[in-house]
Amino acid sequence: MLAVVAAHIVLALCLPALARYNRRLAFAAGAALLAATLVWAMMQAPAALGTGVTDELAWAPELSLSLSLRLDALALAMIVLVSGVGALILIYAAWYFGPRSTDAARSAALLVTFAGMMLGLVLADDLLTLYVFWELTSLTSFLLVGQGGQYRENRRAAVQALLVTVFGGLAMLLGIVLLGQLAGTYSIPEITAAANAGTLAADQPVALGFALVLILLGALTKSAQLPFHPWLPYAMAAPTPISAYLHAASMVKAGVVLVARLGPAFSPFAVWWVPVVVLGLATMLLGGWRALRQTDLKRLLAFGTVSQLGFLMVLFGAGSRVAALAGIAMLLAHGLFKAPLFMVVGAIDKACGTRDLRELCGLGRRKRGLAVLAAIAGMSMAGLPPMLGFVGKEAAYEAFVLEGGVRGWIVAIGLLAGSLLTVAYTARFLWGAFATKGLQPTGGDPVPLGLSGPAWLCALTGLAAGFAAPAVQELAAAYARPLPSLGDAYAAQYELGLWHGFGIALLFSAIAVAGGLLLHQYGAALTERVVLHGLSAQRGYESVVTGMERAAITVTGRLQIGSLPVYLGFILVTLIALPAPALLMGGALPQDQSVYHSIMQVPVGLMVIVAAIALCRARRRFTAVLLVGAVGYGIGGLFVIDGAPDLALAQFLVETLTLVAFVFVLRRLPAHFDEPDTERRVRLPKAAVASVGGVLVAGMAVIFSGARVQPPATTADFVASAPDAGATNLISAILVDFRALDTIGEITILLICAAGTASLVLATRYDKRKGGQVVTSGSGSPKHEQEVMG
């Protein structure tokens, strides 16, 4: 499995060069790899539906860190979308991007890269591996949505998507670390086993709840759940193939996959299922309602995707066997109907030059193939038989009707309302794209097979999957096996199928279809009037971003004022404010701490103190430099007394070089410091901050030196195994072997600083070749510079 993921990265690196030779060949190569990945996964299906197929690469075994992958039922279902639908979208993209497109080569490579990252995410068997691929998908989607960065709309959409998803990802990382510490492992199967056994953080329920909330925050942002949903409709600025792949088939389902992965472990916890189900239902209703008000076909589908993602969240968050069966069916159905609908919109846009349903008229007669294709995919989206979407929605209704109780019926009615909206916006899409509305019929170019063929394969697969419900049942049952059957005995025996007889689920389907058609026919005025003016997640996002920008400008304006003392002061204040309270509360002085270890430390230490105090009173630059050198040489003397001649030698060399550099620069600077009259009045706060900071650093050194209670475990083994090092402990060996390299780096930095400072000083002097002169003081050092123009 690791080789399959790596193959995507290797091919992505080769595609830009291949695209320069032949653009369509590059997309075809990517499609071939994705198709081969799907074939490989299907060949592993018997084992995947059983115990699973695992692969692991230990990259830090001492820390028990590894890249762990597992091919199981959930991963197999997602590979159908990531690799199978992805291969068709790459073929579609080969015809979508014109011969003059500058983004074709870049998009081909990024799409294959994204496919590899998404593949790693769905196969991840531990939380850290999942997080690595999680963030890589965010980065690649940012590049795909932003394209080349030429258009402001793409840049804005890409930045918003990145900010929202990465914010959730960072919160999720905190939750993963906390959960891993509570469980003692990051392995998802081991965490699930501990949670089902009731041994996972049994004595720390608050910490466990906090970890789960943080992890859910990542899932909600990635899958565009309320209130983080606006980034997905704005991401429709990306080209249609990218929208079809990222926002219909793969990326936006990452949060759903995370909830599905951890659902068998945490669905019994209220802190897990309550926010998932509540926010999922709210997202389903809000997304469906907003879709009814869109005039751009692509944005209509985008809000429909938001609604469907909420539906999937409810199914996978409920934690019951039948809901999980419905979840797998709807996961597959959504990719198989939403991707072809996006491709249809792209074909209409290419042929007619518009996606606005107010401008399209009569395409149903002129482009009957596209109309039939869209109708087949739309039937699955609306939940009509014999489509896979109908099978999944029937199971979803059954899951909560069979569960019964207040929760079951509330969720079932919420899903019915959301499905009614789904039928309504499906009808709006088909009517807006293909109906004759009394306008001038829309013309348009012929649609090539490269744009319609992949969409036909997707839509027909969704139709065939409805008839092949037993095969989908086998896949879904393997995922739902560990989940409980809520309800009566029928719930334990329920299987996916096109016909379960007359019942409440079939009644709900009929109500959704009839009500949705009526809402589309007669509810246009209602959808226009009922607008939630006071609530806007997009305005909330913009307010947060604007507030952060203003706060950053305010803070930067107060701090970055070009004053070195101010910079040092804020650094010291931060040092005092953050570590000091923890040090006072948790630190302890060593019991055997002595004032000094050698009598020679006393005079040398006093010399350093006297030089530091005199440095604060110095008025001449040269005197200050000499006193700085005295402090440095005194510290080097302390190193000699403590038995570290190598450190002392490095200190002496650095101080000597610093002194020489300062003397070189001082030739071009005034002899005295230029201090304003107000300088003396602000010295007391500066002195207080400096004194407290110095005492804090000294206290930290003493406390940390006594924090170790046992000798280093590696010292004896190192000395025995590396006699050539000539060291008595590991620390001295590191200092002797690596301090020289560190010192070379320090010397190089000092040389660069000296050269830069000298250049700045010399640059301020007037170039006499231009006819000016410099007025200097009697000592030869420029007291002030004045150009005397001839």
Image (tube, helix red, strand yellow):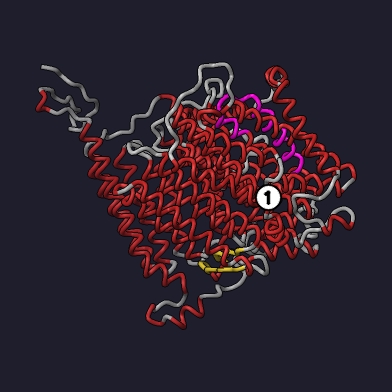
Q: Quadrant of the C terminus?
A: top left
Confirm whether residue 685 shows in the render.
Answer: no
- 236 or 637, nearer to the observer: 236
The quadrant in which residue 120 appears is bottom right
Q: Position of residue 784 (x, y in %)?
A: 24, 25
Confirm whether residue 185 shows in the render.
Answer: yes
Direction from residue 64 to residue 675 in the image, left or right: left
Q: Give the answer, above or below, for where 253 lies relative to 714.
A: above
> Which residue is at a point 32% across and 51% down the rendered structure image?
18
The quadrant in which residue 56 appears is bottom right
- 310 or 477, nearer to the observer: 477
Q: Position of residue 551 (x, y in %)?
A: 54, 29
Q: Position of residue 707 (x, y in %)?
A: 60, 63
Count the marks: how many?
A: 1
Q: Give the answer, above or below, for where 649 lies relative to 350.
A: below
Direction from residue 765 to residue 388 in the image, left or right: right
Instruction: Assess disc 1: are there few (<14), some (14-19) or many (≥20) residues with their C-alpha within 10 Å of its C-alpha.
Output: many
Q: Position of residue 252 (x, y in %)?
A: 59, 44
Q: Secondary structure at mark 1?
A: helix
> Which residue is at a point 23% across and 38% down the rendered structure image?
759
User: Magenta span covers which residues?
Assistant: 277-303
Q: Which secondary structure dominates the residues rendered in magenta? A: helix
Is 702 inside the magenta-drawn segment? Answer: no
Three-letter residue code for mark 1: Gly
Q: Which residue is mark 1?
A: 466
> Which residue is at a point 67% across and 33% down the rendered structure image?
287
Q: Give the answer, above or below, for where 14 lies relative to 738.
A: above
Direction from residue 670 to residue 409 in the image, left or right: right
